[in-house]
Amino acid sequence: MTRLAPIALAAALVVGGCAQRSYVLGQGDANYDALAQATKECQSKGGEIRLRPGYDNHELSGYQCLLGNAR
């Protein structure tokens, strides 16, 4: 059984590397300029800005940048 431990660890690291990634935008007013800048930064990383379910669309913290498999 101990021979399988390194294989299980390697598999867990591979699966963890494919996990969904995202980050919440900073604090402040979600005005046009702030969202435009956040969108530009997010897209430069290959992501997409989306409103977080149940959050206020007037606050930047109500949005997140979804990266990779998270979209």
Image: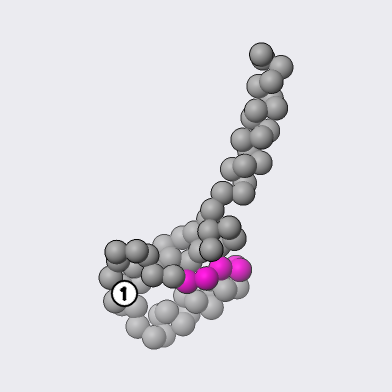
Callout 1: SS: loop
Which of the 4 image quadrants contains residue 5? top right
- Measured as percent of width and height from the top left, residue 43 is found at 57, 73
* Identity of the residue drawn at 53% across and 59% down: 70
Relative horizontal placement of residue 51, taking residue 18 as reference (left or right): left
In the rendered view, tell whether residue 40 sits above or below residue 27: below
Q: How is the image coloured?
A: one colour
> Which is nearer the eye, 50 or 41?
50
- Secondary structure of the magenta portion, mostly? strand
Q: Residues within 10 Å of mark 1 (few under 14, many from 20)?
A: some
Instruction: Residue at 56% x, 68% y: name it.
Output: 47
Give the x, y percent position of residue 28.
31, 73
- State the extent of the magenta-drawn residues as a range: 45-49
Residue that protrudes farthest toward the top in the picture: 1
- Residue placed furthest toward the bottom: 32
Q: Position of residue 62 (x, y in %)?
A: 34, 67
Kindly tell me whether residue 25 is visible in this rendering: no
Residue at position x 47%, y 75% from top? Answer: 38
- Residue at 64% of width from left, 30% of height from top? 9
Look at the image and tell me in which quarter the N terminus lies.
top right
Above or below residue 2? Residue 12 is below
Disc count in the image? 1
Q: Is residue 46 visible?
A: yes
Residue 53 painted magenta: no
- Please, is residue 64 above or below residue 14 in the view? below
Residue indicated by mark 1: 57
Three-letter residue code for mark 1: Asn
